[in-house]
Image (spheres, rainbow, N blue to C red):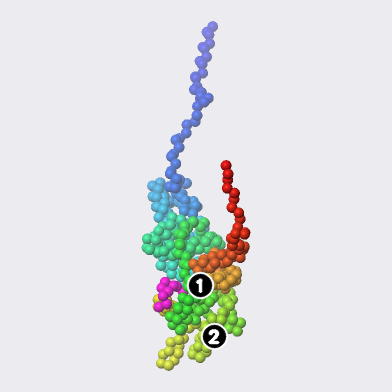
Amino acid sequence: MESSPARSAPPETSKPEAHALPKTSPRKAKRPRGTGSIFKMGKYFYLAYYLPNGFQKTESSRSPLKTVAQEMLRDRLEKIRQGLYCETPLRKVTFQVLADDLLEDYRINCRRSIKDAEARIKKHLRPFFGNYLAAAITTEKAREYLLLRRSEGAADGTIQQELALLKRMLSLASRATPPKIARIPYIQMPRANNVRTGFIEREAYVRLLAALPDYLRPVVTMAYSTGMRRGEICSLRWENVDLLNRIVRLNAVETKNGEGRVIPVSDELLEALTAQLHLRNTTVPDCSFVFFRIVKTKGNARWFPIADFRGAWNTACGAAGLTGLIFHDLRRSAVRNLVRSGVQETVAMKISGHKTTSVFQRYNITSELDLMDAVRKLQKLQDVAEPTRPPQTEQNASPAPPAFVN
């Protein structure tokens, strides 16, 4: 009987090791921070990068080639670095849009300094920021503007006012609905030490009046007596003057700070205003301005409002020995005289039209005569407080201390 053939053993199969790790492809190195990224989605490559306002921008290269996306990314990053390209998810806004919004805000609020703002934007801000988008106006760009204006010889006070306009533009844009910029960049302001301390005493004021032409004397009297600004004085009309009650009323639209005020009239100012009214009634009755200049041609008298009188002012100051005096120093003198006469600070601020105490104190100038007067008052107080010592005599003289004997 034949034996059955032996069963063949099953072929050995390789078993995976228990601790073997799955094979993975090596990770790609990350791109340096700030250089954007490129990825493929579908058949096209996309590029992503961050804008200066902190938002991420993603756009398609519309090409299946990675080199095209790389070239587009390099172009976007370079334009962002130069401040020539920027786009926010909120809205595309240029510097010109910001400037137009600022001037519109000035018109709505009837700001009297709109002409000054227009001139600063046209001559200085627009030539520098005119090609920039609003989101590209950064702290570095504002600092670059500051240094440029200094190299051009502009004073720090002038640069401060120009940067203040730029900050106001950005503030209005951030408060718009919807906002026109994502955030307001930090704008570094230069420290301007341009606070003037000019004023004149009564004796110098009398000399100045004598040297001025006739049509400017009542103007200077008004400024020295009330502290009104030059624009408020030159635009003053008779409808605002009440000679019977001896007050001058300024409406809100006629003042710099947008608040109306009532100004009392002193005896000297009342005399000057009465003379102006008589001159107006007898010479140019159709004139509505309180202060004016009369020009006679061929026997006819014509009146003109007082505008720029710097030439006549400088001539009179030179003749009176007050070279360097400016018209605004009369306002400082009036504030100082109010305080020296004992008027409370709050009342003096109402008369002069100052809204903040800090600015008012800049006008309340202390002279050497004020300091000497303060010392005299202090000495007088001490003399009253200290009892007078009796003269030394033989009777009330204190005995000498006994000598020490060893």
Secondary structure under tag 1 reads helix
Percent position of residue 273, x then y: 53, 83
What amino acid does circle 2 point to? Thr
Magenta-tinted stretch: 319-328
* Residue pointed to by mark 1: 333
> For the C terminus, which image quadrant?
top right
Residue at the farthest bottom position: 299
Q: Is residue 331 left or right of residue 128?
A: right
Label 1, residues with CA under 10 Å away: few <14, some 14-19, many ≥20: many
**Residue located 58% across and 78% down the image:** 264
Mark 2 nearby-residue class (10 Å; few <14, some 14–19, many ≥20): few
- Of residues 372 and 227, the one nearer the viewer is 372
Query: Compared to 1, does 23 lie above or below?
Result: below
The residue type indicated by label 1 comes to Ser
Which residue was labeled with disc 2?
274
Residues 44 and 194: in front is: 194
Instruction: Give the camera-side residue of 123 and 180.
Output: 123
- Does the magenta portion include 320? yes
Q: Position of residue 68 (x, y in %)?
A: 39, 49
* Inter-mark Cα distance, 2 to 1: 23 Å
